[in-house]
Amino acid sequence: MTQTGPLFVSSGDLVADRRYQWALDRAAKGDFAGAADILVQTVELAPAFATAWFALGAIRDRLGDHAGAALAFEQTRQLDPDDYHGARLQLARLGVGDATPAMTHAYVGRLFDQYAARYDTALTENLAYRGPALLRGAVGAVMDAAGRPIRFGSMLDLGCGTGLAGAVFRPLVVDRLVGVDLSIAMIAQAGNKEIYDLLVPRDVENYLADQIIDQRAYDLVIAADVFVYVSDLKPIIASVANVLTPDGLFAFTVETHPGDGVNLLPTLRYAHGQAYVRAALTDAGLAVAHLANAAVRSEKGVPVDSLVVVARKSARRRAPTGPNT
């Protein structure tokens, strides 16, 4: 998912705000050069107007002025330490600074709050999204191979969004299904479906940290189309390993690429190499129970290379520890 439209955050200067809106109107009519000129005037009037700087960067980029775009995005980054606009990602895309900067909570929350009302339709009808169904099939295959019934006492849905994955897995959960998501608007959409026993509007990392402190454990943890917004998976995977029951499963999807490590894609989503994913699981004491290439979704009609992964605690991690081990 990419940014859904122009942002408007007032500069506090009525004239500058009007010029900014005028620039957006010109851009909407295809006059990008004119819009850029107006935005230059806007930031001269209101030098701390981060939103106008970001719009100037986006329009310069559209015009092919990548150096000018980078200068405007860098100014946005300096004025917007929470990176509400995602300027650091745009700079990375242009080859400036960190190649895979972490997305801030402010950026991700804003992105999904904007998108929540049309999220289900966009994914299922326009992007051929089938992540939850693929995860359900992978989890079922692992449970069948182990000779275990496909039932879970408790499940944690990380980045639950509007509940697309929760709806698929709800029939398999006997006791408690918990969903956590950074976006208030996405949580509201999920709540309307009455799927979850508990919905928590919070970032995944801090929620997992609290679950570890409270010694909460889950039989199944899933993350469907969530890790494409996370650069470094290792801390989250390590936290998930600490909230799994001894026989618990962790199922997730990632977009992938043929090489190693992590790439920031032109869509401003992250792709993780298979070797990176395997290493992150091993470092967390988890073993791969299922890993398959699949197209979890499409982008402009083209299937997106992805991995569907199910992991469990490794025998080494589950072994009892003591002075003689």
Image (tube, rainbow, N blue to C red):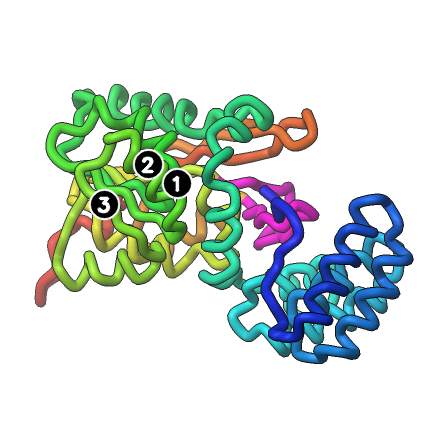
Residue at point 61%, 45% (across, down): 4
Residue wearing tag 1: 161
Label 1 sits on a secondary structure element that is loop
Residue at point 62%, 48% (across, down): 3
What residue range appears in magenta? 254-273
Between marks 2 and 1, how big is the CA–CA gap?
7 Å
Residue found at the very far left of the displayed protein? 323
Badge 1: residue crowd in 10 Å (few <14, some 14–19, many ≥20)? many
Q: Nearer the viewer, residue 231 or 198?
A: 198
How far from the left and from the top, in percent, is residue 122? 55, 30
Q: Nearer the viewer, residue 267 or 8?
A: 8
**Comes first in the chain, label 2 or label 3:** 2
Residue wearing tag 3: 315
Report which quarter residue 35 is drawn in.
Answer: bottom right
Principal SS element in the magenta part? loop
Q: In the displayed structure, would residue 237 be above or below residue 172? A: below
Residue at point 20%, 43% (across, down): 198
